[in-house]
Image (spheres, rainbow, N blue to C red):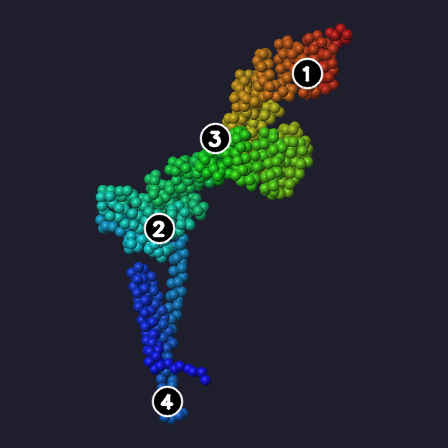
Amino acid sequence: MANTQQPSGKQSDLSSILKTIWAPIVSLAGTVTLVVQFIELWRGDQNTVTLIIAIMGALLILAGLIWVGFGRITFEVPDFVSPGKNKLKSDWRYSKGIRQLAFAGIIAYFITGGVSGYLLVRHRQELEAKTIILIAKFDGPEENYGLTDELLEQLDDALTGYEDVQVVRLGEVVTVEKGSKYARKIGERYLADIVIWGWYRPTENPNVTIHVENLVPKQIEIIDASEQLKPASSSRELESFVLQQSIGEQMSSMVLIISGYAYYVAEDYQEALSRFERALALQAPSNELINLADIWFYTGEIHYSRNQLQQAIADYTEALTIDPEYIWAFSSRGYAYANLGLDEMAIADYTKTIELNPQCACIYYYNRGVAYGHLKEYEKAIADYTMAIKLDPTDDWSYNNRGNIYDRLERYNEAIADYTKAIELSPNDELYYQNRGETYTDLGKYDNALNDFNKAIELAPENAHGFNARAIGYEEMKEYEHALADYNKAIQLDPEYPSAYYNRALLYEILERYEDALADYTKAIGLNSKSALYYNSRGDLYYNHFDKYNEAMEDINKAINLDPKFVGAYHSRGRIYEITGDYEQALADYGEIIKLDPKYKFAYLGQGNIYYLLRQYDNAISEYTTVIGLDEKYAVAFYSRANSYFGLGQYEKSIIDYTTAIKIDPKYTNAYYYRASSYYMSGQYDNAIADYIQVIALDPGYAAAYCYRGFSCAAWPKG
C-alpha cells in the first residue's frame, strides 16, 4: 500500500489565510493603480478625463432609468394553500406612472443620443473638409506683448471670406515641457491640420520660438511635419509690436499658401491662384517656413495651364530668383519659351536642367532635341535624341523624332530604322506607321508605304491624320483620284483639319482646279491664321494662275510678318518684284534669302536672272556659277549661264553649257533651240539645223524653230 503524506495543520491554516486575503489585496492594488493612472491622465489630458466622466455619467443615467423602468422586488407573503407557510412574490419596484416616465426617458435618451451622434459625425465631416489651424496661447508675458492676439488678428484679417479655413484658439499654453508630442495630440483631438505654439521672453534679444506642427504632411507637402521658426528680433521690435506684426504676416501667408495648395492639388486653379497671390502680397521675399520659390512655381504652372505663357515665364523667373537651382522652374520655363517659339531661350533652360540633374535628364534631352529641330540645327537635335535614348532605351518618342530629323536630312534608311524601333516599342501607335510610310514614299517604296498607311488607318480608323498621310503617299505615286478620296475622307472625319485642306489645295493645283485650290487655301487660313506657309501658297496661286499681284503681295507679306525667316516667302515676293520689273526690291529679297540660307540656290538663280535682264551678263554668270556649285545637276543653271554667254557673244562657251543642260535633261526644248542659235551665230549651220529639228520633234508647235531652221538651211552652203 502506497504511503501518502497529509499536510500538517499549520500548513493548512496558512493556505486558508492566503486564500482569504488574496482577493482583497489584488482588488486594492488594482484600485490604487487605476486611481494613479487616472490622476496622471487628469494632469496630462483633462479633456479625455472629462469625456470619460461624461460617458460614465451618461451610462449611470441610462442604468438608473432602466432600474426604475424595469426594476422588480421580491418579498414573502402568506401561502393560503399551505397555512403556516410563506411564498415568494415579485412585483414592480415603482408605480406605473413612474415607470412610464422612465420608459419615456429611455426613449428620449436613445433619440437624443442618435441625433447627437449624427450631428457630431456631420460636424466632424465639416471640420475634415476645412483647413483647421489650432493656435495655442504663447508662453510669455501676453498681457504686455499680446503675441497670440496679434497672430489671431492677422489671421482673421487675412482669411476674411475664406469659409473653408477655420482658426481655433486653444485657451491653454503648450509649454516646452509638454512639447511637440502634446501639441500634436491636442491637434488631433480638434481635427486640426496645423498647430501653432511657442514661447518668448522679453529680454534684450527676445528668444522667440514658434513651432508649426503639420498633422497631415501627406496632404500638405509644402512644409515638413514639424517646423520651427526663430525670428531674429530686438526688445525694441517686441515692445513696438513690429515683431508681432511680422510674425502675424508670416503665419497668415503660410496659412493662405497651405489652403491654396489644397485647391491646387484639387485642380481648382482659380481659387489656388487667388490665395497664392494674396499670400505673396503679404510676404517678404524670404520665409523660414515655406520655400516661396515653390509658390511662384505653382502660380507659374497655373498661368501655363491657361496658356498665359508670358506671365508663367515671369513666375518661373521669380522662383529662380529665390532658388537659382530650382530644376522644375527651369524645365517649365523652357516649355513656355518653346511654346512661344523662343527656342534659343528654351534650349538654355533645358541645358541648365540637364546640368542640375544629368542622370534623370531623358525628357530634357528630348525637349532640347525638339527645339534644335525647330532651329534646323539637325546634328545637335540628333545628338540630344541619341542621349535621351541612351538614358532610356524604351523611349519610343525619341526614336520617332530622331527618325523625323533623319528624314529631313534625306538619310532615309536611318529614318526607317528609327521608326521601326519606335514601332517595336509601341506597336499600336499609328503615328509611327504614318511617318515610316512617308519615308518609304520618299524612297519610292510605294508598296511598303501603303502597307504602313493602311496599318495606321487600321489602328485609328477615325483619325483623320492617317487618311491625310496616305493621301500624300498616293499623290507622290500620281494616283490622284485615290489621293483626293483620302483628303476628302480626312476632312469628313475632321472638318476643322487645316492641313487636309492645305494638302488638297496643292492637289487641286496639280489637277489645274485653281478655283477649288483657292477655296481650300482660304479655308486652311481660316482654321489656322498663324501659318505663314498657307498665306505664301495662296499668294503663289494668286500670281501664278490668277495674275492677281496685289492679292499675292498681300498674302506673301503676311507670311513674312508671321515668319521673318521664311525663305520661301522671300523667294515668292522676289519673283513678283522680278515679274513686275521692280528689280531693286527683287534683289533685296534674294539677298535676304542668302543671309538666311547661303545654300538656297534659287536665290542666286533669281539674282542671276535679274542681272541678265539688266544685261549685266558678267554678274549673271557669277550668280549662275554659284548655283552650279551648289547643284551640278541643275539643268536650268547651265541653260541660264549659257544665255548670258550668248549675250556676251561667247558662243562656244554657251554651246558647252547648253550641251550640259541637255545631257542633264534630254527633253529640255529651249536648250536645244538656243544651242541651235549659238551654232547659227558661230556659222555651224548643220548643227543648228539638227537642233531645230530636235526642237520640232519635242514640240511640233514651236513656230520659231521652223523659221530659223529655214534661215539655217539658206545660210548653209550645202543647204
Circle 3 is placed at which residue position? 344
Marks 4 and 1, how far apart at CA: 150 Å
Circle 2 is placed at which residue position? 213
Mark closest to the chain's N terminus, 2 or 1? 2
Choose mark 3 or mark 2, whichever is in front: 2
- Regarding residue 260, the answer to whether it shows in the image is no
Instruction: Specify few, some or many for label 3: CA neighbours under 10 Å numbering under 14, 14-19, or 20 or more.
Output: some
Instruction: Specify few, some or many for label 2: CA neighbours under 10 Å numbering under 14, 14-19, or 20 or more.
Output: many
Horizontal side, residue 612 vs residue 64: left or right: right
- Looking at the image, which is closer to me, 164 or 627? 627
| Label disc, if present, on residue 86 of the rendered structure | 4
Q: Amino acid at mark 4?
A: Asn
| SS category of the residue bearing label 3 | helix
Marks 4 and 2, how far apart at CA: 74 Å
Instruction: Please determine whether, in this image, residue 133 is positioned above or below residue 76.
Output: above
Instruction: Specify few, some or many for label 1: CA neighbours under 10 Å numbering under 14, 14-19, or 20 or more.
Output: many
Coordinates of residue 677 in the picture (x, y in percent): 68, 12
Marks 2 and 1, how far apart at CA: 90 Å
